[in-house]
Amino acid sequence: MKKILFTLSLFSALLSCKNTSEKTEKAAQETPVETSIAYPSDVIPFMDKWKILLGDGTTSNDLVNFQKDDFFYVENEAGINWVVYKTPNAGITSPNSSNTRSELGEKRRWIPEEGGKLTGTLKVQHVSTTGDATKSSSYSVVVGQIHSDEGHENEPLKIYYKKFPGHTKGSVFWNYEINTAGDNAGRWDYSTAVWGYDFSVVGDSAINYPEEPKDGIALGEEFSYEVNVHKGIMYLTFTSEGHETKTFTKNLLKSDFANKTDIPQQVIDRYSSTRTVGVERDTAYAGEKQFFKQGAYNQANRKSTNSETYNGDIAKQYENGSYAEVWFKKGSVGASEEPKE
């Protein structure tokens, strides 16, 4: 009898454990699992110093714990979090531009004499695969800028990445836009190559591309830039593992292009057939309010590059390669620093 009672007790205990386990498992299945969301401000904590405009027209002045699927969000790759800036060829743009962007705009304003410093470590994951190879802006994205907030509101710095379709390697270059004397009809950009080509190198027809640059940067390959404007001089430093470090300086207080004889041949070849080639005011950007920008400023708009936009359908553009996507893992913005010797 005792043996029978012991067996019944054991069976009852096992059954009770089984029922408890099943209830616990069922409850776990029914209870939603909380997942932590990583925001761009968790990855690069300078977001309180910026506002943003996204490719669908979304704007925000408060970027702490802010993200927007498909435009501004965090992607984890091999345990590293990256801030993603993604924007189509056609969407909603700022009032004075034909180019869409998912791009930060600095809240602070400063003059070149006061200066400021911007850094970024990034990789470009995609540029538009549609466009006209004879147009300088095709297949390119701007990943960092200095923008004027006075006068003509021109841009003393734009840092580009550009890759022609079918090429493995693309180019990194920077453009300086003159602060024109008089009206702004004669404005132009002078381009300087970092790795690969500068802005002026194009195809000889809409579908024929130049040779692939030998010292270029591939999609997905990391590089870093530092922009340090100190006492009116812009100091640029570009670094990438396996590539030569490049440094440049540019005076923002005194023009290099104040006379017709100062205009580079690159500019004459690039612009003279389509517009007036003007000169810059002698004081360049002296005393004019500036601010930094960083992210993905897509240059492949339909008007200037004949890129495909699918009538502005963003989902179709993303599906068919008509977009730019840039990932940043580090960045800083703040006061200028005495340049290193």
Image (cartoon, helix red, strand yellow):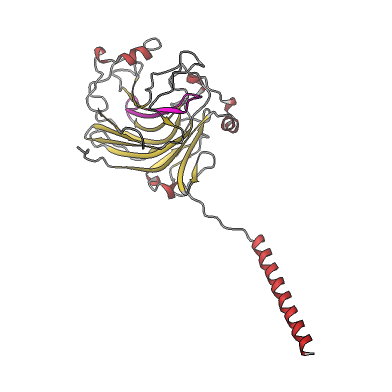
Q: Nearer the viewer, residue 127 or 297?
A: 127
Q: As drawn, is 319 to the left or to the right of 184? A: right
Q: Which residues are magenta?
A: 150-172
Q: Is residue 103 visible?
A: no
Q: Is residue 301 visible?
A: yes
Q: Is residue 175 above or below residue 73?
A: above
Residue at image position (64%, 63%) is 28
Q: Residue furthest bottom?
A: 1
Indicate the position of residue 176 as horizontal and vertical percent values: 32, 25
Residue at image position (36%, 16%) is 185
Q: Residue furthest top?
A: 273
Indicate the position of residue 235 as horizontal and vertical percent values: 26, 33
Q: As drawn, is 220 to the left or to the right of 145? A: right
Q: Is residue 261 above or below residue 139?
A: above
Q: Nearer the viewer, residue 100 or 144?
A: 144
Q: As drawn, is 226 to the left or to the right of 233? A: right
